[in-house]
Image (spheres, coloured by chain):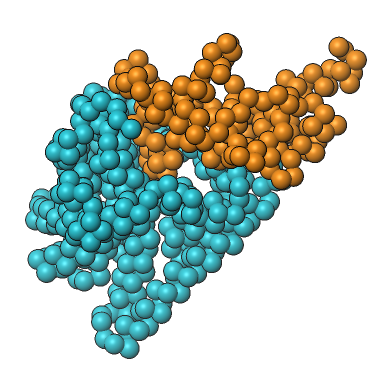
Amino acid sequence: MINSILSLGTIFILGLVVAKAVNKLKLPSVTGYILLGIIIGPYVLNIVSKEVLNSAGFVSNIVLSLVAFSLGQNFVLENFRKIGKEILCLSVGEVMGAVTFVTIVTWLLTKLPFHIALVLGAISTATAPAATVMIVREYRSRGKFTDTLLGIVAIDDAWGLILFAVCFAVAKSIEKFHGLDTTLLISSVIHAFFEIFGSMFLGLFCGYLLSFFSGFTKTSAEFLIYTLGIIFLNTGISILFGFSVLLSNMFLGTVVANIDKTSFRFFDTIKTIDSPLYLLFFVLAGASLEITSVRNLGILATIYVVSRLIGKMLGAYLTGVIISAEEKLKKYLGLGLAPQAGVALGLALIAKEQFPQIGTFILSTIIVTTVIYEIIGPILTKIALEKAGEINVKYES
Amino acid sequence: MQVKEIMFKNVIAVTRSTTLKEMLTKFTNFHSFPVVPVIDEERKLIGMVFLRNIIDAFSVVKSHISKAIAFYEEKEEEDIFRIELDESAGNLILVDDIMDTKYFYVYEDATIEEAYRQMKIYQKDVLPVVDKEEKLVGIVGIFDIILAVFRQNKII
């Protein structure tokens, strides 16, 4: 039986190798990590130790706190001005399009209860900005469409996290109070509000803490440990009180980005250690895939993949019409947003922790659809960029 | 000892609207590209240009976007030899497009120990120096601090 440290070493080294192999195929590294996880996981080669496997939820919480924290820096007024009204509106539009369409279609076409369809809908909003960036770089596309697309994929994960936190809180309440009876519905809403505002207040408090006492650190090592410590305290207290880990960390990031003039140092220091955690996260997510259930997923996976695409395309198109965006933005943006990966996986892992039985089903669906999207997604993005006429364009101001 | 006693005062600064070509022309006789403060009409410090920003100008993904992307993959090498910018890029790219709007800096009345600590924690060799009204008054580097220490100990 392989021991945990050996598992970790294997995961890291094989992870590097697989990433390079997969990059040669013009696919993002994430695809490689997930596939590696599936192969070395308990259902195929089984060379990952039980303890490491069981740590998937733990690793996922840590990784998502860091991701949420980092996304928080988007919500600074100056950044919004740089990003621009178009990107802000279109990103909100495609996110709303995805959650609405996926939730309703999934609920109507499958036997899933509403609150689970809601969770799936919320997860479907996530995109894979890293994959999109990879395509943009690979084909050196340039222009308004490219810039808009990049701006949207960067910020829509932030909207997605917020939306997920809200939908998740609502879903938990619905499940707890069993159904949509009016009085119980009100309790559900109050409960959800408590969770959401509790998270925001905690994030606010820790944000001030983070900035205020940062002066006591004298070396870069101390600064890193201090930043991590505050983030983990924030996450831990969130979990303790049943708040949203995502919201509290996003709020932490936002507060610190707004009150501290040199806030970038907090976000930069996290970047020094996040790569091995991310690798581990994706491999463990892949290893969590129950291959046996994949056969049953066929229908749900197909419904999800198709409805997510349509939802995003419709959302982007309708918003484009409302704000009078250019023709090519309206038509091809949704397509460009196809890739799905890390954030969706993280959210699915959170869902699995909360709703153990059906959660595994959600997780397997998301893993399978992520692999699908990671393969067809980049192709769709490339098509969108081509149709927008921005591949092989000389630099124009 | 305060930073203002050892800082370098004749800083070459640029404005938001300085073009890439104008800025680089100022430094063609330098051995390496220094850090360049960006100031407004009142000489207030509003940005910084580092070597990294110039290389980023060739990148398709603007850094204010890439910083906030979840699970961002760094490219192995920024292939500057494959640039597809044409000649007008020198006049079209402005400092405003590439500068960092977030940066470290020190006040002129800070102690040199404080400045040294900042440079050490955040691994910066040079910091811009501002006065109480946030106006640029100079730049200070680790080398300036070391020289000051040597002078204090009469080594030089």
**Front-most of residues A46 and A258:** A258
> Among the chains, which one is orange?
B
Q: Position of residue A101 (x, y in %)?
A: 17, 63
Q: Position of residue B83 (x, y in %)?
A: 33, 19
- Please identify the quarter of the rendering in which residue A189 is found: bottom left
Q: Position of residue B88 (x, y in %)?
A: 35, 23
As drawn, A175 above or below A145:
below
User: Does residue A136 appear left or right of residue A49 in this picture?
Assistant: left
Which quadrant holds the C terminus of chain B? Answer: top right
**Front-most of residues B89 and A9:** B89
> Among the chains, which one is cyan?
A
- Please identify the quarter of the rendering in which residue B121 is found: top right
As drawn, A73 above or below A265:
below
Q: Position of residue B81 (x, y in %)?
A: 35, 15
Q: Is residue A388 visible?
A: yes
Query: Which residue sits at x=46%, y=25%?
Result: B20
Query: Which residue sits at x=79%, y=32%?
Result: B4
Residue farthest toward the bottom in the current orientation of the protein: A183
As drawn, A83 above or below A122:
above
User: Does residue A268 appear left or right of residue B118 in this picture?
Assistant: left
Q: Is residue A368 visible?
A: no
Query: Which residue sits at x=71%, y=38%?
Result: B130
